[in-house]
Amino acid sequence: MNNYMLYSDQDGSYVSMMEGIRRKTLVHGESTVLCKFQLDKNTTLPLHSHPHEQTGFLLSGKLLFTIDGDEREVSAGDSWCIRPDVEHGAQVVEDTVVIEVFSPVREDYL
């Protein structure tokens, strides 16, 4: 692996994770992976958990998160960090674009 990785937003394409949710893996290192998500209004991301810490920043749109049983609305400029193995999901209130970092690397996103 090189000592660095650069990515242009023109590179790559989105992968459909489920109807209304698309992911583009941007860059990754030995312990983190950076992804961009496009989420369509009225889509529900079902409750789930994974062994990765998940840190995110909402670029545009609005989500209603359910995290560890608590509901929180987030909008453009808001950020979060969800610890590993914590159950979470979201209702997409508006068309939304999110940037998220996962650690350790999600091999399934490479």
Image (cartoon, helix red, strand yellow):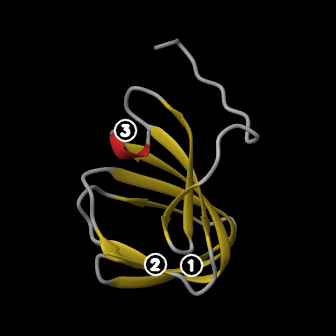
Upstream in the sequence, badge 1 or badge 2?
1
Q: Label 3: state its secondary structure.
A: loop
**Residue found at x 53% / y 82%:** 43
Q: Which residue type does callout 1 highlight?
A: Leu
Q: Nearer the viewer, residue 100 or 23?
A: 23
Q: Which residue is mark 2?
A: 90
> What amino acid is labelled 2 in the image?
Ala
Which callout, 3 or 1, points at the residue further toward the start of the chain? 1
- Label 3, label 1: how many angstroms apart (C-alpha)? 24 Å
Q: Is 37 on the left-hand or right-hand side of 44?
A: right
On the image, the x and y values in percent for residue 13 come to 64, 47
18 relative position to 10: left or right: left
Q: Quote the CA–CA distance across marks 1 and 2.
A: 6 Å
Q: Residue furthest right?
A: 10
Cα distance in 3D space between marks 3 and 2: 22 Å
Q: Amino acid at mark 3?
A: Val
Residue under pointer 3: 105
Residue 70 location (% of width, % of height)? 35, 83
| Dot 2: element | strand
Q: Are marks 1 and 2 in contact (CB under 8 Å)?
A: yes
Quarter of the view holding residue 86: bottom left
Q: Residue at x 63, y 76 (%)?
A: 40
